[in-house]
């Protein structure tokens, strides 16, 4: 088996040429079969499987399989499978970009050296930018460019950190970073950019909703969770991550409450839930890392359900703002049912996935005696009802719309229905059979989620939150508005720096160039006036004048030579004094 070992992520990358060249009917078969086959191959690999190659003087560890890496790769493949089924009507460039993106994310989850990780990381950045550009909306091009600039910034930080780390450690192996060296701090900053950490949290809501309905499925499942995987692998226990994750959790809730675009609501909730994971990574310890792994899987599945539901509505109605939607439950009953299950999973309702994963993270906070983090996460769990939990399905499916959308027959193809059913069933499977998943976690532990205390605690959170939302729902009615995020401030600062810095330097350089050019022209004119064909020094002079000039030059030489004599100089000095 070792001799035939191939990286699962590279297998997905090998599909890209076929998607680019083969007829569409064959491409759809490839989209439907590739992710489950690669997933099957992933679980056929032996534990601790490894593959190394020597290239350009470096040992590249393309496969360094771990329990956490296998689970993350499995979640990526399942989300890719659902996204592929939903992307049947998409263009070829979206298929190719999606599989470059997904293959690189899967490869990162099982590679063991920094060089390979960086190469796959940059492929992810470029491929995901193409997915943003596939949206075809008015702001898709500009949002994609901002997305690319943010991730190139993260790539530069990551590359600088890796270079500094290699100079200090002289090893390319990916290991937990426990020191605060320059290299490890830069690597951390590069990964936090991809996780949506402050001050660049805005890029998630800025870019994801500008992609196509199917492209957002891949985007929501891969980029931030890949960053979470690397953070959990290398930075577990770094306390600086606790306040960063807390900020992300609060930030996502506040901005989602004011948002009118339903896909931006889901994008902000991604930042909120990734904040949970970053806090758990900062707490560290076996329980916390198990909780991160569980919550990453749960979040990928229920967010895939919600994003596909929003994509179905966008495809069917052409509307993406909550002011244009409402009352669609009777028209799309199956999509509504799946959305309710995904929303329940996002809130942590018992028998769904997040009930299990959030409970483990809260248990880790209790074990490490960080009470304020426990209170913060508990409050954020309740506040989820006000964005992806209740507000999103209420706005889209149950709120009475004053101007109903025109009736038209449902045109959902079987592949789209399969795409939303797959992650919905996974949300329920994790919640109903958690012990099956506990046996696969990175660290062995015994959890009993369905205790009376835990269920009572969860209902004490959910029931008041749901009641409060229902009481305040008149205030939750969307209003058409433009919501300013931190990107507005950063853009203003960049424009100010451009206008007051770069443009002024350009203006100064132009003035200096003009001065130098004018001086050069004047000097040339002076030389031409004296040494040109009609210049004074170019004229024919009489012999007597030449003799006079020679005599004057010789006399000057004699005087200057005599001045070198100390006695003559003293004589002249005494004569004048």
Image (tube, helix red, strand yellow):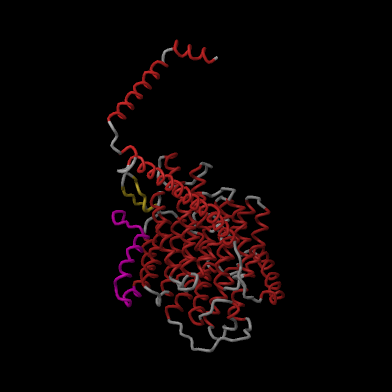
Left or right of 5: which side holds 377?
right
Q: Which residue is drawn at the image coordinates 34% and 71% (left, top)?
A: 30
Quadrant of the image for the C terminus?
top right
In depth, the one of 535 and 272 nearer the eye is 535
Q: Main structural element of the magenta stretch: helix, strand or loop?
A: helix
In depth, the one of 69 and 103 nearer the eye is 103
Classify residue 246 by image quadrant: bottom right
Residue sticking out furthest to the top: 567
**Vertical comparison of 250 with 342: above or below:** above
**Vertical comparison of 478 with 441: above or below:** below
One can see residue 291 in this view: no
Q: Position of residue 551 (x, y in %)?
A: 33, 23
One can see residue 337 in this view: yes
Q: Which residue is drawn at the image coordinates 52% and 46% (left, top)?
A: 185
Q: Position of residue 395 (x, y in %)?
A: 61, 77
Image: magenta residue range: 1-29
Quadrant of the image for the N terminus?
bottom left
Q: Which residue is drawn at the image coordinates 34% and 46% (left, top)?
A: 59
Q: Position of residue 151 (x, y in %)?
A: 47, 57
Is 154 magenta? The answer is: no
Classify residue 80 by image quadrant: bottom left
Q: Which residue is drawn at the image coordinates 57% and 58% (left, top)?
A: 490
Numbered label tally: 0
Left or right of 173: which side holds 328?
right
**Vertical comparison of 262 with 120: above or below:** below
Q: Position of residue 548 (x, y in %)?
A: 33, 26
In depth, the one of 448 and 119 nearer the eye is 119
């Amino acid at each position: 088996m070792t001799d035939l070992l191939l990286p699962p992520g590279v297998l997905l990358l090998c599909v890209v040429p076929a998607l680019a060249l083969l007829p569409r009917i064959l491409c759809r078969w490839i989209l439907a079969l590739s992710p489950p086959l690669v997933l099957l191959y992933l679980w056929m690999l032996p534990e601790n499987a490894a593959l190394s190659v020597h290239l350009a003087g470096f040992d590249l560890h393309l496969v360094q399989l771990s329990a956490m890496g296998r689970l993350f790769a499995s979640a990526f493949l399942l989300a890719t499978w659902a996204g592929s089924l939903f992307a049947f009507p998409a263009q070829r460039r979206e298929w190719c970009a999606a599989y470059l993106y997904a293959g690189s994310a899967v490869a990162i989850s099982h590679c063991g050296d920094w060089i390979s990780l960086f190469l796959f990381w940059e492929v992810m950045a470029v491929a995901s930018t193409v997915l943003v550009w596939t949206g075809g909306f008015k702001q898709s091009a500009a949002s994609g460019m901002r997305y690319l600039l943010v991730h190139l910034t993260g790539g530069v930080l990551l590359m600088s950190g890796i270079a500094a780390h290699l100079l200090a450690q002289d090893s390319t192996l990916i290991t937990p970073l426990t020191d605060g060296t320059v290299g490890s701090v830069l690597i951390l900053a590069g990964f936090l950019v991809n996780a949506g950490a402050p001050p660049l949290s805005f890029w998630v809501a800025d870019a994801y909703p500008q992609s196509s309905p199917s492209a957002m499925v891949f985007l929501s499942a891969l980029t931030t969770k890949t960053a979470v995987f690397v953070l959990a692998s290398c930075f577990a226990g770094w306390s600086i991550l606790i306040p960063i994750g807390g900020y992300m959790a609060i930030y996502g809730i506040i901005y989602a409450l004011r948002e009118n675009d339903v896909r931006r609501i889901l994008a902000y909730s991604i930042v909120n839930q990734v904040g949970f994971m970053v806090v758990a990574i900062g707490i560290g310890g076996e329980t916390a890392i198990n909780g991160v792994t569980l919550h990453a899987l749960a979040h990928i599945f229920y967010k895939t359900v919600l994003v596909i539901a929003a994509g179905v509505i966008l495809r069917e109605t052409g509307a993406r703002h909550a002011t244009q939607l409402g009352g669609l439950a009777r028209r799309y009953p199956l999509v509504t049912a799946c959305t309710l299950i995904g929303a329940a999973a996002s809130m942590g309702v018992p028998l769904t996935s997040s009930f299990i994963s959030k409970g483990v993270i809260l248990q880790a906070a209790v074990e490490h005696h960080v009470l304020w983090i426990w209170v913060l996460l508990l409050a954020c769990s309740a506040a989820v009802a006000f964005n992806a939990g209740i507000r999103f399905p209420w706005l889209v499916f149950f709120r009475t719309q004053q101007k109903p959308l025109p009736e038209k027959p449902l045109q959902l193809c079987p592949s789209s229905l399969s795409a939303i059913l797959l992650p919905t069933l996974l949300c329920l499977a994790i919640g109903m059979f958690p012990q099956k998943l506990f046996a696969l976690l990175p660290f062995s532990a015994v959890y009993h989620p369905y205790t009376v205390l835990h269920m009572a605690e969860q209902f004490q959170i959910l029931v008041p939150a749901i009641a409060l939302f229902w009481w305040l729902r008149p205030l939750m009615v969307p209003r058409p508005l433009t919501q300013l995020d931190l990107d507005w401030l950063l853009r203003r600062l960049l424009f100010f720096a451009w206008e007051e810095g770069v443009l002024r330097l350009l203006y100064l350089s132009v003035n200096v160039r003009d001065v130098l050019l004018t001086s050069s022209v004047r000097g040339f004119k002076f030389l031409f006036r004296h040494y040109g064909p009609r210049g004074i020094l170019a004229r024919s002079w009489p012999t007597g004048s030449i003799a006079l000039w020679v005599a004057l030059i010789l006399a000057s030489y004699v005087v200057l030579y005599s001045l070198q004599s100390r006695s003559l100089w003293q004589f002249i000095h005494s004569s004048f004094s």
